[in-house]
Image (cartoon, coloured by chain):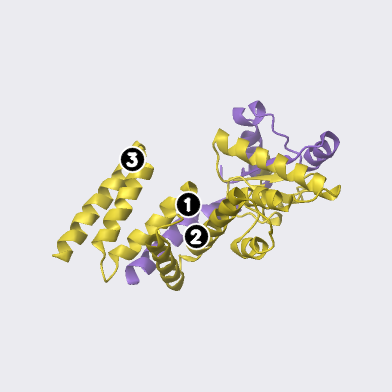
Amino acid sequence: MHVTTRLKDRPHENLLSEKGFRGFPSLAFLDAEGNVLTVQRDRSVAGFEKTLAALAAQADLQRRIAKGEKGLEFELFVAEWSLGTLDFAAVEALAGSFKKLKPAQKEQLAQIVLDAEVMHLIAGAQSEAGFKDAAKRFREILDAGKRMPSADIEADFWSVLMSKAEKEPVDAALYARGLKEMERIFGKDPKRERMLQQMRERLEELQQGDD
Amino acid sequence: MKPTRTFALATTLLLAAPLAAQQDLTPEELQSRLDLKVAKPFVGNGGWVLDYDLARDRAVNEGKYLFVYFTRSYSG
């Protein structure tokens, strides 16, 4: 545990910012040299176990590759993706380098590329231009009717589309579809019921406006 | 746009007061807050290492990673 105190001359007082973090609390795995390996965002037990498993897999793969074992690059890529150390640009750059993938690996790669793009667009959606880009691309993904974002980012995906549906020209049908997905994602969580109810009321408003 | 700016300004002002108060704390007060923080049960019960250099030494010797929980004591 590292405690920022504002006491002067205390060793490593600025460790938080030195490691690239801003807010409290922040949780991260570091190697023995102090390099940040991954940020722990999911604070559930399952989330910690998933990170530990990915770190162990990454270390094992790196050892085997260093010893000269071939054909492990894709597995290492998947481990690094699951640790959150690859952004969309890195994923795009690496995706083209994998040859001779098995069908299941091709599926996995396609999903990672899509997820990386969706996460990249969501991160930029705070700005007006970024929001337009995200909404346009997400609508394309939806209309294509094929691959959809993974479970951990699908709520953000639908949130962008529902926000777009509220803007002129209003698209109540898209909002209704988004609401149905949100009810599937959050329907069993009592803490989300108020949010869902507000969405239902908003849908009614949008539908009345369509008349 | 105006309501948003007003809200942002009000939020900034509200946040500024406690932050200013925190910056006025004496070294003794800051040390006291640190002592209170590390005395909390979750710190001792969790087996946390509070010395970063010691934690890194242990990571090297035991062949382990560091899991770091960054927190603060000055805000009380």
The kind of residue tagged 2 is Val
Residue B58 appears in which quarter of the rendering? top right
Badge number at residue B44:
none
The residue wearing badge 3 is A187
Tell whether label 1 touches label 2 (CB within 8 Å): yes
Judging depth in this view, the residue of A39 and B74 nearest the camera is A39
Q: Position of residue A197 (x, y in %)?
A: 26, 46
> Which residue matches tag 2?
A118
Pinpoint the chain carrying mark 2.
Answer: A
Q: Is residue A37 left or right of residue A50?
A: right
Q: Secondary structure at mark 2?
A: helix
Specify the colour of chain A.
yellow
Among the two numbered marks 3 and 1 on one chain, the one whose residue lies closer to the N terminus:
1
- The CA distance from mark 3 to mark 2 is 23 Å
Q: Amino acid at mark 3?
A: Gly
Tint of chain B: purple
From what the image shows, is residue A178 above or below residue A43? below
Residue A198, x across and y down, in percent: 26, 50
Residue B24's x, y, as percent?
Answer: 60, 53
What residue sits right under mark 1 in the picture?
A: A153
Amino acid type assigned to the residue bearing label 1 in the image: Ile
Check the image and report above or below for A85 versus B36.
below
**Image quadrant where one finds the C terminus of chain A:** bottom left
